Amino acid sequence: MGPTGYVAIGDSQTEGVGDPDGSGGWRGFADRLAEQLAGLTPDLHYANLAVRGRFARQVRDEQLDVALALRPALVTVVAGMNDLVRPSFSATEVGACLDDMFAELTASGARVATLTFPDLSQLTPILRPLRHRVLDLNASIRTSAARHGVALVDTFGYSVITDSRLWCPDRLHANPVGHARIAAAFAQALGLPGSDDSWSRPLPAGERRTVVSRVADDLGWLARFVGPWVYRRVRGRSSGDHRVAKRPTPIPVIPPTTEPA
């Protein structure tokens, strides 16, 4: 696959937040995808440049040139979630940043893959005001992906993607089950041998929750996650402050012998 087989750029989802690796760090869909690729290309080298809290503009400005310098055969680009929840969000500006990355990466000869965002209002009614933002950004992503020949994982509209059993308690990061589904979706979009559409199939029916339990859960979520998030933003801080990429140098991929819990 070339000097560097696979480079992942983006924010916390690509970093792997929500999917423990069993050693105190994060695994995530990109690591999982790299492991699948390594099964097809044993000498695969993989770098992950993602840093949590980054906006699409920051991913473009801080990670794109580094990725290009590595001359990857494959790049996944996932950015925009941090922009979606900001008051100053502009689908046009975020879409332009993503389009810039798609253009430069595909022009370099790399295969590029990305995804659209799910309907966040299905995770919690409190996020319903963000639905039109998601629709606008997804439309931009689809247009850019088609323009540049980018492989697209279109998550919007699949009920399983907003099943709470795929998400961490913060409702913004996928859990291990969710990251595994995202990796499988990318594998299908890239046409990897053995991939299929099983990632999009619903989970078995779960226990029905009462209105009281859902309201209590929403209130707990507001206190535990939304409050601290707002506090950080008021102070001009980010979860990604002083953090660096977890895998800045391409190194061989060693698949785990067992699945982390």
Image (cartoon, rainbow, N blue to C red):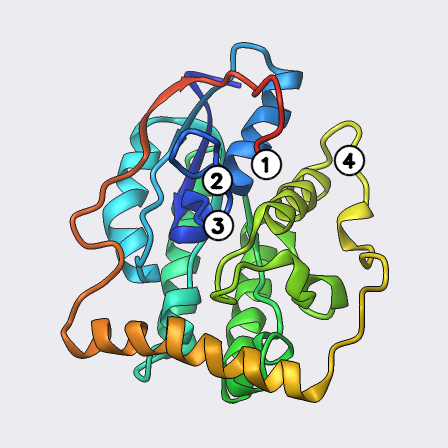
Question: What quarter of the picture does the C terminus occupy?
Answer: top right
Amino acid residing under circle 3: Gly
Residue placed under numbered mark 1 in the picture = 261
The image position of residue 121, as x and y in percent, is 59, 81
Residue placed under numbered mark 3 in the picture = 18
Q: Residue at x 39, y 78 (%)?
A: 223
Amino acid residing under circle 1: Ala
Q: In which quarter of the image is residue 162?
A: bottom right
Q: In which quarter of the image is residue 201?
A: bottom right
Label number found at residue 195: 4
Q: Mark 2–mark 3 contact, CB under 8 Å?
A: no
Residue placed under numbered mark 2 in the picture = 20
Q: Which of marks 1 and 4 is nearer the N terminus?
A: 4
Q: Could you tell whether 211 is left or right of 148 in the image?
A: right
* Nearest to viewer (mark 4 / mark 2): 2
Q: How far apart are marks 4 and 2 (CA)?
A: 24 Å
Q: Is mark 2 on a helix, strand or loop?
A: loop
Q: Distance between the residues labelled 1 and 4?
A: 23 Å
Amino acid residing under circle 2: Pro
